Amino acid sequence: MSATQDLLFKSLSDPTRRAMFERLCRQGELTVSELTEQTGISQPGVSKHLGVLKSAGLIRARHEGRQTHYSPKLDGLSPLMDWTSQMVGFWQSRFDRLEDLLQRMDQ
Amino acid sequence: MSATQDLLFKSLSDPTRRAMFERLCRQGELTVSELTEQTGISQPGVSKHLGVLKSAGLIRARHEGRQTHYSPKLDGLSPLMDWTSQMVGFWQSRFDRLEDLLQRMDQ
DNA sequence: CCGACACATTCGAATTTGGTTATTTGATCT
DNA sequence: AGATCAAATAACCAAATTCGAATGTGTCGG
């Protein structure tokens, strides 16, 4: 349902894009050229991937002269963590209710 | 890099599939028919989505007579949580190093 | 055994996606 | 100003995805 989650999962579903995001998390800030060097794909390809990550709220762009520096956004992964823990929570609460039931049946 | 993560993100990147997984987390266990009723897509479509979720390790199948019951796998989301916290960790440790640096510069 | 049922699988059409090359925009240097 | 460099955008193509219709497989009831 949520468009935010959709953008998040979609952008992270591509291995190249995920690798780029990982590099940004490790290194903090990188230019398009630096990112292009090790990905094995062309510069326009890299720019496109960065656009996707940016529109998903995972990275930010900082323009400095003729080059653009990209860095991870601290709260970009929050919706992902929220969703995940919510899913685990659903399962957990079901489990708890089951435990309750069993305990009541025990008596 | 990791094939597990790839399968996970890819299977959760489809909104229909994510909605199905959410329903399973909320309800615990559902048959293909029950899942088909509310998704708005055909039964073969549902079966295929379930196959993707299953091969990603997110759900399990339990055959009972001529119907199949699907339920979420408790540890299916672990690799996702691991990856996420690792990313946050990278950022955090960079932040810590920066704090260290600033503190040393302060003196 | 035969028909109905629950689900899985196959196949083909329509759409989306990931990549390219070519071009454009904007900043820097001489 | 003109050349050059960094990055973004455009136009395009091949491959992958998603879906439905048709079909296959196994199970239950009569």
Image: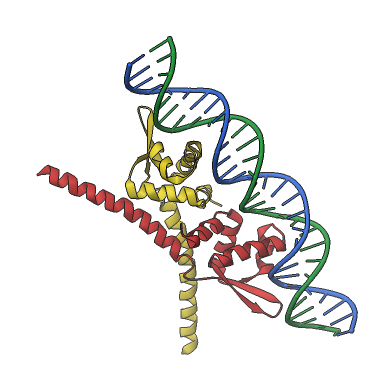
Chain colours: A red, B yellow, C green, D blue
Residue in the image at 38% along x and 27% along y: B66
Residue B21 location, x and y as percent?
A: 42, 48
**Relative to A26, does residue D15 appear above or below in the rendering?**
above
Place residue B57 in its image quadrant. Answer: top left
Residue A35 location, x and y as percent?
A: 65, 65
Q: Is residue A97 left or right of residue B22?
A: left
In the orientation shown, which residue stands out farthest toward the bottom? B107
- Residue nearest the viewer, comparing A33 with B39: B39
Q: Is residue C11 left or right of residue B8?
A: right
**Relative to C25, does residue A46 appear above or below in the rendering?**
above
Q: How many numbered discs?
A: 0
- Residue nearest the viewer, comparing A14 with A1: A1
Residue in the image at 54% along x and 64% along y: A56
Note whether residue B8 is visible. Answer: no
Residue A19 location, x and y as percent?
A: 58, 59
Note whether residue A10 is visible. Answer: yes
Name the image quarter holding the C terminus of chain A: top left
- Residue nearest the viewer, comparing A63 with C1: C1
Residue in the image at 46% along x and 57% along y: A1
Residue B105 location, x and y as percent?
A: 50, 87
Residue in the image at 28% along x and 50% along y: A94
